[in-house]
Amino acid sequence: MMFKHRFHPQIKAGLITRTYRQWKKPQVKAGGFYKLGGEGFIEVHSITRQQRSDIVADDLGSTGIEQIAELEALLPASDGQALYCVDFSYAGKREDLLPNTEDPESNDELESLARALVLRDRNSKTGPFTHSTLLEIYRNPGTPSATLSKTLKREQAAFKQDVRKLKKLGMTISLESGYRLSKRGEAFLRYKRLI
């Protein structure tokens, strides 16, 4: 769940604790932790479906948005998507929630990674992506996702979602522009003799 950078200081200060989102189905769940850029995590406390007509100005007090018109401009009504109210709090850095990006300690750990990638390839609606994505990032660190996805003949949004799956396994690291492989990602490619 992404927030514009201008909201980050207020979220960290506890002044913004609510957001409205428009989704086909909820993209977060109560009790879940979600990254706030590189500034720690937020914890979601509740998510409820909301009717636009029920939202009043007082509901916006903890969103960082002052007027209903601004909310409407940010989230124009869209067929097939519902509006959700998400209440959350800033949870701090939470190092325990960050994926392990260091070198695996054993071949068993590398094999566990291999099984995780097989599962992600098998469940992908667009076909296997893990090895080709890792290799493309390895060969082109810092390259924007628009360029990488074009090279791989992938839709950019789907490509970025797949990179996030690899990031959760500790294999990629997001940069200001593009990505690079972590030590863990490079170790896996060496283990599989792909580099």
Image (spheres, rainbow, N blue to C red):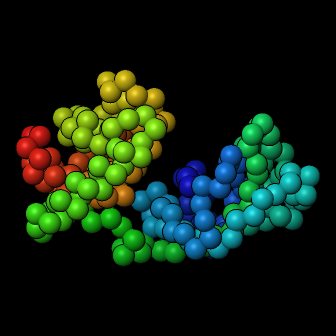
Q: Nearer the viewer, residue 47 or 19?
A: 47
| Drawn side of residue 170 relative to residue 66, left or right | left
Question: Vertically, is 128 above or below 88?
Answer: above
Compared across the picture, whether 11 is left or right of 176 comes to right
Quarter of the picture containing the C terminus is top left
- Residue 58 visible? The answer is yes
Name the spot of residue 94 as percent of width and height, x first: 41, 75
Of residue 91 and residue 128, the one placed in the foreground of this image is 128
Residue at the spot x=36%, y=67% of the render?
98
Can residue 12 be seen by looking at this rendering? no
Name the residue located 87 percent from the left edge and 57 percent from the top edge.
Answer: 55
Q: Quadrant of residue 136?
A: top left
Pinpoint residue 138: horizontal percent, then vertical percent: 20, 40
The picture places residue 57, in percent across and down from the top left corner, at 87, 59
Residue 29: where, in percent of width, then height? 60, 65
Residue 95, image quadrant? bottom left
Q: Using residue 134 as the reference point, say whether residue 165 is left or right of it.
A: right
- Where, quadrant-wise, is the N terminus in this rendering? bottom right
Q: Residue at x 47, y 74 (%)?
A: 92
Residue sticking out furthest to the front: 122
* Residue 88 location, quadrant: bottom right
Tally of numbered tags = 0
Q: Residue shown at 22%/54% (left/top)?
A: 114
On screen, 102 above or below 134?
below
Give the answer, above or below, for where 195 lies relative to 111.
above
